[in-house]
Amino acid sequence: MSWSSRHLLVPLSAVLLVLSACGGDDDKNPVCGNGIIESGEACDDGNRTEGDRCNNSCQVTTPVIDAGTNDAGSDTDAGIDAGTETDAGTDDAGTVTDAGTETDAGTGTDAGTGTDAGTGTDAGTGTDAGTGTDAGTGTDAGTGTDAGTGTDAGTGTDAGTETDAGTGTDAGTETDAGTGTDAGTVDAGTDAGTETDAGTVDAGTDAGTETDAGTDGGAIDAGPAPDAGTDAGTETDAGTETDAGTTATLSALEPAAVFARSGTTGQTIPESLEVTLSAEAATDVVVQVSSSSPSVVVANNGQVTVPAGSRSAAVIVTADEAAGSPKATLTATLGSDSRTATVRVLGATEQASLAYLSPETVSLASGETANVTVTLDIPAAAATSIALSTTGNVGSVPATVTVPANEISAKFIFTAGASGSTGTIVATLNGQSVSAQAKVTAAPTTNHIVISEVAAAGSTGADDEFVELYNPTNAEVNIGGWKLQYMKATTGTVYTGEFVIPTGSKIAAHGFFLLTQSKYSGAVKGDANWGTTFSMGGAGGHIRIGPSTLGTGASEKAVDKLGYGTADSPEGSAIKGTPAAAGSYERKANAASSASTMESGVDKTKGNSQDTDVNGADFVIRTTRDPQNKASGTEVP
């Protein structure tokens, strides 16, 4: 009958999160503030201070573990400015201190317009190789050998003398068209993108070196309007591979709240703060991270590099509690994306206090175990030993648990004691205690889903039918895909009626699930409807439940089965008799249950756990039916 050996059940994992504490040794005159948990007190840490874990009425208040608050970030915006001191990325790359050299690569008399290829020392010789119409058109504006041929002051033999307006194919060497008072004419050179160059029509093939705000190069670069705007700008470059023009974008700066201990340099605690990209970086990607307080300084001038092939990188910080606010908001920026996180600076020897135990309520059967976590309010400065104990014979725990240095929590194992006992699990540190409630339940007498109530007919007719299921175990069970099957009362060898329970259907621990026929008339709504797939015989029949692998043969093992009335293939023996029109067959809560105790007596709300594999001994006939569904609540045996 039962599939107890098939282990269909989900392992026990139910734990509630409602904190309650009890204990103490003075039931008559509890004193709040004496450091002892007494009757009516949920905690007692030796004081009556409001705002901590234990308030002035000795009741628990859950503290907020606060590593800081959010901040709006800093004033610096690398998206508008492109990131350099003299600005190569605003509306005009041709202002006084803009993308040119000291005098200017694009203002004043202009170092690259139609009628002038440079004034002052110019790109020519003494008589000027850059006056008249051009320094490289017509006959020649140069001297002796050649000041340039064609339309270029940098071809031929030479476009000038020692100071040189460009030799070969380059008008962009150290002293050429990108220095002093000259930035070149039509062609500022193949390079035109070295240290002090900004160029005009062609700002260079490079256009992405130290002080260049260019991306694509040319007029749309270090120049007006179109500007270097496609670059989010890092400190020394607004147009390299690590800018905002890459495929990967900034997706996170996490965890949202972390700590750093004063006087240290390294990763944050208890977890490392990291910048994370939306995808693996094709090349090294630099993310700029700024801090709102000098108490937290980001290494490498705030530049955090995500290596090629990676998605994240740790943020390394130096903490100094005396330098500023102990809470700093760090802002990570890449292109137009930004994320924030908070870092709280801890004193070099600042001590932690207990915050809470979790789960705050543990419910187990005798002998079962569960992991319990003790959490501090801040990371421990050094390895910290916490004393553990229990009350009410509820179970056992280790004598101590240690939270490692720079960690904020540690786990230990609680083993449930005697069935039916209740008490607390207590953690104590430096005279302060926190607790969790514990309850030991009786082990279930039946460890599988059972058919708990069946009506093969009803007050509105023969098809006013339902089958109720009950979960007597301590864990939720997923019955999605299971089968509900019916076979006629006598000489049957095959279950001819079959309904597959919808995917995702679940029964809570000690809960119910209601299956109904299309003509069911009860006020309690069915959780699934088998329609007209089958109609049960009023005088007798067989109904069973099993997994998706259950076949139709009468001899196959099911999870549970009921043979009623004239059934010739029940478990053990059938439950004899026929209920009244408004009645039903119901499984007992325990061996002593009767129809009266199940309907209105002591067993009414104790579930339906009795299962001896004999239908006649496990069921009673009710005079009034009582269908329950998954919304009806739970009944603990």
Image: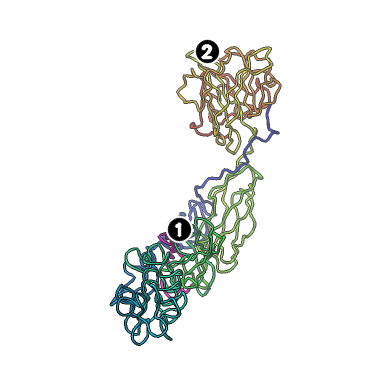
Question: Mark 2 = which residue?
Answer: 462
283 is higher (above) or lower (below) than 617: below
The kind of secondary structure the magenta stretch mainly shows is: strand
In this view, the residue farthest toward the front is: 139
* Residue type highlighted by circle 2: Ala
528 is higher (above) or lower (below) than 7: above
Residue 32 in view? no
Quadrant of residue 550 within the rendered picture: top right
Circle 1 residues within 10 Å: few <14, some 14–19, many ≥20: few
In this view, the residue farthest toward the left is: 108
Asked which secondary structure carries label 2, the reply is loop
Q: Nearer the viewer, residue 161 or 613?
A: 161
Q: Is residue 385 magenta?
A: no
Image quarter hosting the N terminus: top right
* Residue type highlighted by circle 1: Val
Q: Is residue 330 magenta?
A: yes
Q: Nearer the viewer, residue 403 or 256?
A: 256
Query: Which circle's residue, 1 or 2, is located before the other in the chain?
Result: 1
Question: Mark 1 = which residue?
Answer: 64
Asked which secondary structure carries label 1, the reply is loop
In this view, the residue farthest toward the bottom is: 126
Tell me residue 252's x, y (percent). Answer: 47, 58
Q: Is residue 547 left or right of residue 436?
A: right
Tell me residue 158's x, y (percent). Answer: 44, 80
Q: Nearer the viewer, residue 81 or 2?
A: 81
508 is higher (above) or lower (below) than 125: above
Q: Is residue 449 left or right of residue 599?
A: right
Q: Nearer the viewer, residue 77 or 24?
A: 77
Q: Which residues are magenta?
A: 319-343
Residue 193 in view? yes
